[in-house]
Image (cartoon, grey):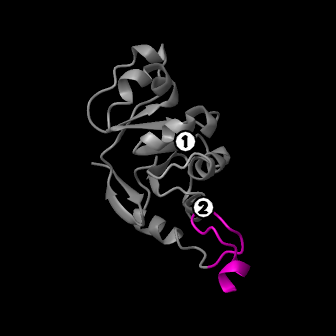
Amino acid sequence: MPKLVKDGAIVEDTWTLLPKPEGEATDVAVPTGHVIVPLSVWLAQKAQLQSRTDIGVWLDSDETADSLGEDAQSLPLVAVNFPTFMDGRAFSTARLLRERFGFTGELRAVGNFIRDQLCYLRRCGVNAFAFSNPETDLQAALKSLNDFTEYYQASVDQPLPLFRRRA
């Protein structure tokens, strides 16, 4: 079973990520078990899927947090996709899911992000990291979560700026 970094530890990945459908999203057969469906499948089959507690949704880089909106609060997992490590739109999506839509579940980065981005992703609210490269050294990735020990700015994981924390 594949592994991922979640909440500062290396754990088994019990979720299956469904690819984007080539045909109609309404025709996709969603299997039983923990499944992360593309946003298009969620929107097309929401009536059937919303009663399940084992469904997560993943957003591609061209899909916004507004597309999922308040539905995020009812999901155990939302994933944000990085088609390339240079595409940073998922950072904004993650932060909006946490701050604007009140998502409190597992927020997972998937796709082609790199180890150097983990610390910043955590600051945007991401708490799980599923690397696309199975050769990734997860122990080294864990260390990246603590690349910096102090920040001036406020963020999802530290809502007060440094001057307020020192006061």
Where is 62 relative to 146, above or below? Answer: above
Q: In this picture, is 136 found above or below 70?
A: below
Q: Looking at the rendering, in which quadrant would you find the C terminus?
A: bottom right
Residue that appears at 47% across and 21% down: 21
Residue 104 lies, in percent from the top left, at: 47, 53
Q: Which label number is shown at residue 81?
A: 1
Q: What element carries label 1?
A: strand
Q: Tell me where residue 138 appears, x and y as whole percent.
A: 41, 62
Q: Is 145 above or below relative to 165?
A: above
Query: Label 2: how many residues lie within 10 Å, few (<14), some (14-19) or many (20+)?
Result: some
Location of residue 116 (image quadrant): bottom right
81 in magenta: no
Task: Please tell me in which quadrant of the rendered image residue 15 appears.
Answer: top left
Query: Left or right of 46: which side holds 123?
Result: right
Residue drawn at point x = 31 percent, y = 39 percent: 34
Of the residues shown, which amino acid type is indicated by label 1? Asn
Q: How far apart are marks 2 and 1 (CA)?
A: 19 Å
| Among numbered discs 2 and 1, the one appearing first in the sequence | 1
Callouts 2 and 1 close, C-beta under 8 Å: no
Residue type (three-letter) at the residue carrying disc 2: Val
For the question of whether residue 64 can be seen, the reply is no
Tell me where residue 31 appears, x and y as whole percent: 29, 27
- The residue stretch that appears in magenta: 150-167
Q: Position of residue 97 (x, y in %)?
A: 57, 47
Local crowd size for mark 1, using a 10 Å CA cut-off: few (<14), some (14–19), many (≥20): many
As for residue 162 lying within the magenta part, the answer is yes
Whether residue 37 sits left or right of residue 29 in the image: it is: right
Q: What element carries label 2?
A: loop
Q: Is residue 18 visible to the viewer in this orientation of the structure?
A: yes
The residue lying at 57 percent from left, 45 percent from top is 101
Q: What residue does disc 2 label?
A: 156
Query: Quadrant of the rendered structure where residue 46 is?
Result: top left
